[in-house]
Image (cartoon, rainbow, N blue to C red):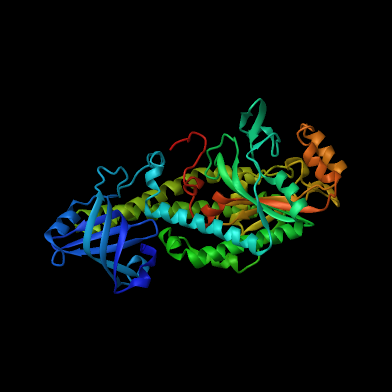
Amino acid sequence: MIYVNELQKHIDTEVNLHGWVYNYRSSKQLYFLEFRDGTGICQCIISKEDVSEDIWEKANSLTQESSIQITGKVVADERSMGGVELHLTDLSIYQIAKDYPITPKEHGVEFLMDRRHLWLRSKRQWAIMRIRNEVIFAIHSFFQDRGFVQMDSPIFTANEAEGSSTLFETEFFDQKAYLAQTGQLYGEALAMALNKIYTFGPTFRAEKSKTRRHLSEFWMIEPEMAFYDLPMNMDLAEAMLKHIITTVLARRADELSILERDTQILQKIANNPFTRITYTDAANLLASDKTRELMDGMTTDRLKEKEELETELTALKTEYGQAKKYRKTQIDRRNQQINARITDVEEDLRNYPQWKEAALNTKWGDDFGGSDETILTLHYDSPIIVTHYPTEIKAFYMKRDPQNPKVVLAMDVLAPEGYGEIIGGSQREDDMDLLMEMVNKHQLNTTTFEWYLDLRRYGSVPHAGFGLGLERTVAWMCGIKHVRETIPFPRMMGRLTP
């Protein structure tokens, strides 16, 4: 069987394809069909002169998402997606789809999310899923090429790794259990056995949050390395992200183009070192005049952008009445883009005053919120690695800095362009007494942590690791605003179906 993404290899030959109608338009003598098969989309042309009356009638009976089998000659065409188009000679129909609910017109997000099982067929969502797959491939290749062993951690756990307030509690036969927030603690045990490992699996957070960065179920990549310290941990995280970027740029150019992603930004990041700053420097920057000037400037820019967009909308409305059919289609599409962008701009204008006030009031010891991370990333073109967070706001297992116990040897990697945290990690506490002190301070159940404490009793060594949020990383790679589009079927507060 031949697929759309292979058509470049079959120019000037006849092929047979199976798939669905993505879009279509017709004239008296020609029928233009956008055909998709899951691997790509190609334009197909049916000429009334070149096919039988039966084939022509079948073509004119097609509807959006009808399933079909087509035969035709592959012809080179640089203007078409994939560099080819198909001149059809035969067509058979599996099924005519009736009243497909997602049409080329504009739909609201909730309408589309309720029909996620169908929305995944759209060009934009198709591109995002392809990039997600490429990010996953890049992660596996990065670690496998460096001698890491992929391991699995349990989803049911008795341990509270990140705090009980964000746990989904369930029953495991006659025991209380939780859905895992992280595989890290088990990763540490595996690293003591295999030296360098990574886990890749679903994790769960019960935070009652509806922000663009939060999902209740998401996928985490968590490497754990024996004999690693914080600088080595940072180096590994930076190398991994650069590998992901390089792989996606090389293998998913068409998908990035569909999403209109600015690839020059990603290319620059792949070729330059990340910025590394301490939490203390980051807190001072948030509270500085630089932040005040940055936010005031961005507010001015957004107001100007909104005015320009509204002017363009008015001009398009005037043009629409006299436009030909093909131009009206272009205007409709542009109107959708403009209205979507105006919605985003208006949201920014509502948020900026609150963000600025919160940032300017930052005090040492405050945990950074999502808006703080966004503002920090807007000060730089590269990802930022923030280190040495206050001990009081970080997890019990993070190693305190021997030179300054008020901070831990932790790191967060913040993606630029306002995307914020995509990686969190640390050097782990390897001293048994210090770890017990933190377990007691956090009032954790020592019985359920006995196995974890054994790792410090028997052959404890310096070690470190981090967790990468897959969906946040995919959102950054794609240049999209909300993580709900980066996972096939998102689970978040208020969303359990489809």
Q: Quadrant of the C terminus?
A: top left
Q: Is residue 444 above or below residue 284?
A: above
Residue at image point 69% right, 39% down: 162
Query: Across the whole image, how many numbered discs are drawn on residues?
Result: 0
As drawn, is 217 to the left or to the right of 23? right
Q: Residue furthest top?
A: 174
Q: Residue furthest right?
A: 433
Please identify the quarter of the rendering in which residue 355 is found.
top right
Q: State the image quarter where residue 276 is shown.
A: bottom right
Q: Could you tell me which residue is drawn at 46 percent across and 57 percent down?
A: 130
Indicate left or right for 479 with 33 as reference.
right
Give percent across and percent down for residue 398. 77, 46
Q: Position of residue 444 (x, y in %)?
A: 76, 33
Is 430 or 347 nearer to us in this picture?
Answer: 430
Q: Residue at x 38, y 41 (%)?
A: 115
Can residue 410 be seen at all in this image of the molecule?
Answer: no
Is residue 473 something one can see in this rendering? yes
- Closer to us: 273 or 180: 180
Q: For this rendering, which residue is in front, 176 or 372?
A: 176
Q: Position of residue 54 (x, y in %)?
A: 14, 57
